[in-house]
Image (cartoon, rainbow, N blue to C red):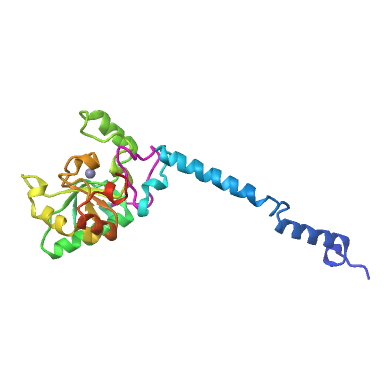
């Protein structure tokens, strides 16, 4: 009996060829033909290249040497590339509840914002209010402008500012004295680590961080790292082993 469509007949030559084609498509023709030693040599070459470039301190995008323990380290020796933009930035003006803002265009990563919100709400519960966040994410281009407008030594070169990570903020309060003399500062000194923040540039660590005392600058690193850094009285550089 002749079929109207030869492709429907499983025994037809065309149907068999199609079956063979499908089987061939599933199996790459050269699979497992490369000798094992070639694979090992190729892998070793890739690893050597990676190790070499990290060791020499080349900077292309963000490499794993600056993500020790999942923590991004940014300083003058470990700059970010011009095109590095953190994921999931949020505008604090649209999100914040328990702190004030100096401007309506301050952004940080969502994770950083959520930790900030928790922290400032806890301060409020302790009757410590009046925090004013003045700065968050700053892109490479903006840092370049600031650097070029500043006296030598007063601003980080583009790429070297931690503000490009979106993981930090500057804070102040209404005071005529310095922020470090306020009760808000005292509260942050005592509690910031419980919410994953560190005071990134302590008074006596400029020889390690490369940046002089900034009582207003806080960096999100997560509770575990922040607690360890505070308990050991060390810097982020020391914590990630970059010193
Ligand atoms: Zn800052």
Count of marks overlaid on the render: 0
**Quarter holding the C terminus?**
top left
| Residue found at x 28% / y 60% | 224
Q: Is residue 138 above or below residue 126?
A: above
Q: Nearer the viewer, residue 137 or 220?
A: 220
| Residue found at x 83% / y 59% | 17
- Residue 110, given in percent of the width and then of the height, sits at 32, 55
Q: Which of 175 and 201 is in front in this view?
A: 201
Is residue 97 something one can see in this rendering?
A: no
Task: Report the residue that reaches farthest toward the right.
Answer: 1
| Residue found at x 67% / y 50% | 35
Quarter of the image for residue 232 reads bottom left
Is residue 25 something one can see in this rendering?
A: yes
Task: Report the residue that reaches farthest toward the left.
Answer: 176
Quarter of the image for residue 11 reads bottom right
- Residue 144, given in percent of the width and then of the height, sits at 30, 33
Point out the stretch of residues depicted in magenta.
71-91
Quarter of image, ligand 1 = top left
Q: Is residue 78 magenta?
A: yes
Q: Is residue 128 left or right of residue 115?
A: left
Q: Which of 95 and 139 is in front in this view?
A: 139
- Residue 80, given in percent of the width and then of the height, sits at 36, 40
Task: Report the residue that reaches farthest toward the front.
Answer: 37
Q: Does the magenta stretch include residue 4?
A: no
Q: Is residue 203 left or right of residue 79?
A: left
Instruction: Give the main secondary structure of the magenta stretch.
Output: loop
Q: In this view, does 149 lie above or below 11?
A: above
**Quarter holding the N terminus?**
bottom right
- Residue 165, given in percent of the width and then of the height, sits at 32, 46
Quarter of the image for residue 222 reads bottom left
Q: Is residue 57 left or right of residue 187?
A: right
């Amino acid at each position: 009996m002749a079929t109207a469509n030869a492709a429907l007949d499983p025994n037809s030559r065309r149907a068999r060829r199609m079956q063979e084609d499908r089987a061939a498509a599933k199996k790459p023709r050269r699979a497992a033909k490369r000798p094992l030693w070639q694979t090992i040599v190729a892998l070793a070459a890739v690893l050597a290249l990676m190790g070499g470039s990290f060791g020499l301190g080349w900077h292309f995008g963000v490499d794993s040497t600056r993500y020790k323990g999942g923590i991004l380290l940014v300083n003058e020796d470990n700059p970010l590339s011009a095109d590095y933009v953190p994921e999931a930035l949020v505008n604090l003006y649209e999100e914040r509840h328990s702190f004030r803002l100096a401007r309506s265009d301050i952004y940080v990563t969502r994770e950083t914002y959520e930790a900030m919100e928790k922290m400032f709400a806890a301060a409020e519960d302790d009757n410590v209010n009046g925090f004013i966040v003045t700065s968050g994410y700053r892109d490479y281009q903006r840092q370049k402008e600031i650097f070029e407008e500043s006296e030598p030594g007063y601003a980080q070169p583009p790429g070297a500012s931690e503000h490009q990570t979106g993981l930090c903020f500057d804070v102040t309060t209404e005071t005529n004295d310095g922020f470090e003399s306020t009760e808000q500062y005292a509260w942050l000194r005592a509690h910031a680590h419980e919410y994953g923040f560190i005071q990134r540039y302590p008074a006596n660590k400029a020889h390690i961080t490369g940046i002089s005392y900034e009582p207003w600058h806080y960096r999100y690193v997560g509770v575990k790292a922040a607690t360890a850094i505070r308990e050991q009285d060390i810097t982020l550089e020391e914590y990630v082993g970059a010193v």
